[in-house]
Amino acid sequence: MSNALISPLAIAPMIDWTHTHFRFFMRLLAPQALLYTEMQTPHALFNNPQKNLYFDPAEHPIALQLGGSVIKELILCAVLAQKQGYDEINLNLGCPSDRVQAGRFGACLMAEATHVSDCIKALKDAVDIPVTAKTRIGIDNQDSYDFFSSFVFKLVEAGCDKLIVHARKAWLKGLNPKQNRIIPPIHYEYAYEIKKDLGELPVVINGNIETFSEINSHLHQVDGVMLGRLACNNPYAIADIHQALFKQSRALSRLEVLDLYLAYISRDRHKYTPLSIFLKPLLTFAYGLPNSKLWKAELLGIQQNKDWSKLHNLVTIMQRIQLNTAF
Ligand SMILES: Cc1cc2nc3c(=O)[nH]c(=O)nc-3n(C[C@H](O)[C@H](O)[C@H](O)COP(=O)(O)O)c2cc1C
């Protein structure tokens, strides 16, 4: 089993966030974290594999998350991903959006354990890299531990190599995806119990985890934690957490990260990525510092005016923000 598969720290798949540039940024903050792509559908991959499968070599270890349930399509995607060098294929069994339900994938597949296990088995037969699943703990009124565990055991019997548990159920009707990440209560005990029941199989816990002390206590029960919104809202917290988890590694300072990320932007500018996409991970990079609002305003100004030439000022601006000196 590869080390990547059992990394104690993973950055969650997040649509419109965990694109290649965000992941590169995360890699600077968390050298040993396992990074997930945003969910990719087979259609998106087939339409533009060059863009949608792209990752920078620095992003390793990296997992591709797939959203789909047509076995032939999933197999083709997994084979392409393996060829591209991905370290893991992850199947999305947690997204509750209407669009995703209409396509018969994501969380609604929790009602179709036999079909999901066929998908996992087909993926396992098609590729040599680990095949994993990210699931909720239930859907609608099917939210007992027995329901969850019998679903999971089907996946494991089919060969699933790791289970990521977003420890709340999803309501398939009446809540949008954002509400479905807030309203259903968290039940970490489902992930703890399934770990006991599964024994060796790696279990990663996800949902509302924000501090190292929370992480530490989860790691007494399961093999890893996956962080999502924290990475978007307070990215530098990821560097602190990584440093606390991997004591031998030295966390880069905010200025060092910024310097490296700006060098990356100037290296990759020729790929015609809009400035706003490059800057998105930086918007919250001063979270918690005095003047963090000024930092965001500066970035939004640069973004609005598409003023690439001002990027090199950002290091000085961050220095001033950190020193809390006047602008
Ligand atoms: C903007 C956004 C987009 C998301 N997109 C995906 C996705 O593509 N695939 C997925 O499995 N989960 C997705 N999620 C859910 C996260 O991976 C994670 O399970 C959830 O946010 C709970 O973790 P957190 O409390 O650490 O944020 C998304 C979450 C957010 C906030």
Image (tube, rainbow, N blue to C red):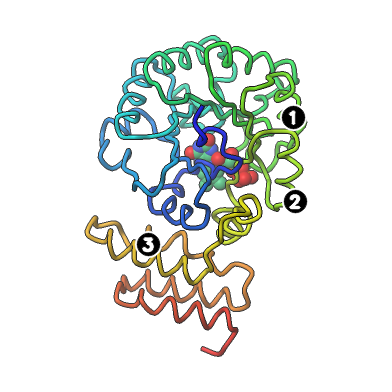
Mark 3 vs mark 2: give the one in front: 2
Which percent across, then down, holds residue 225? 63, 40
Q: Residue at x 62, y 59 (%)?
A: 240
- Mark 3, Cα crowd under 10 Å, few <14 / some 14-19 / many 20+, is some
Cα distance between the residues tagged 3 and 1: 40 Å
Q: Which circle marks residue 276 in the picture?
A: 3
Mark 3 vs mark 1: give the one in front: 1
Q: Residue at x 46, y 49 (%)?
A: 17
267 relative to 54, above or below: below
148 relative to 257, above or below: above
**Residue 271 vs residue 65: left or right?**
left
**Residue 294 vs residue 220: left or right?**
left
The residue that disc 2 covers is: 213
Quarter for ligand 1? top right
| Residue type indicated by callout 2 | Ser
The residue that disc 1 covers is: 192
